[in-house]
Amino acid sequence: MERRITMDSLRRYLTRPQDAAPQNATGADAPAAVERCDLCATPVADGHRHLVDLSSRELRCACRPCATLFDRPGSGGGQYRAVPDRRWYLRGFALDDAAWDALRIPVRMAFFFHDSAARRAVLLYPSPGGAVESPLARATWARLEAANPVLGGLAPDVEALLVDRTGDARDHWIVPIDDCYALVGLIRTHWKGLAGGPEVWREITAFFAGLRRGAATVDARGGTRDGNRPEGARP
């Protein structure tokens, strides 16, 4: 059974265009709301880091000092984990059309991550209503990991395998989990009608183009970049 995921922290991705510039009583644009660290309330700038609340899967905004406190697994009592900033484009990733079709999801994008609370990998896909969780057999993930050793280095809860198979694309990345939810928010914000409309597809194309520009290229089957073991890999 599919399960829809709602995340309060997606609010900053889901601002509707008509709500983007609220006005005060005089008709002038009101000052934009200041984003703050969810732990200490310090104002944070664009591009700030996030924490994952492991009990709810919610993203929390974090200032740099607070995020640093949770960089190591188990710190802070294990309630939060800091989201890293590793972005790898996976060259030679093994996922053929038959294996993809066997996932039985209705769209051509998806992301996978290790849910430490559930002790398993989970599969989600973006939709106009938010992120939707779809069943993922343990054996399916095990085969994917065996074919692509780089997946052994995924940091639980905070990194994801992101797959783009829209159009002619067959692209795979390891990305911070907040990138995946940014994509979800982008689709929810810009989707129009039954097929989405040209605006949302321009935004999706721009999202993946920007991701490709900022990602290092890594061998998915060897799991190496410049001959080095992936950062954070399990021994």
Image: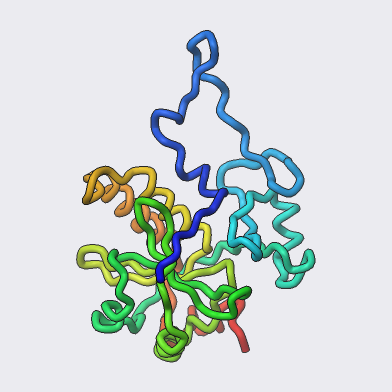
List x then y, in percent, for residue 55.
Answer: 65, 64
If the image is split into quadrants, where does the N terminus sit? bottom left
Residue 143 seen in this snapshot: yes
Q: Quadrant of the C terminus?
A: bottom right
Question: Residue at point 29% right, 64% down?
Answer: 107
- Residue 70 versus residue 19 in the image, above or below: below
State the residue lying farthest toward the top.
26
Colouring chosen for the image of the structure: rainbow
Q: Nearer the viewer, residue 95 or 171?
A: 95
Image point (51%, 78%), residue name: 121
Residue at the far front in the pictured view: 1
x and y, in percent, of residue 144 in the image:
41, 85
Question: Where residue 100 sits in the image (x, y, percent)?
Answer: 30, 78
Quarter assignment of residue 58:
bottom right
In this rendering, the count of numbered labels is: 0
Residue at 70% in and 56% down:
67
Q: Answer whether residue 179 is visible to the viewer in this image.
A: no
Give the side of residue 202 with respect to residue 222, left or right.
left
**Residue 211 against residue 145 in the figure, above or below:** above
Q: Relative to 110, say whether 203 is above or below.
A: above
Does residue 165 lie above or below 225 as drawn? Answer: above
What residue is drawn where x is 73% and y is 41%?
41
**Displayed quadrant of residue 167:** bottom left
Residue 228 position within the rendered picture, expressed as x and y whole percent measured from the top left: 54, 82
Question: In this rendering, would 207 be left or right of 32?
Answer: left
User: What is the quadrant of residue 215 in the picture?
Assistant: bottom left
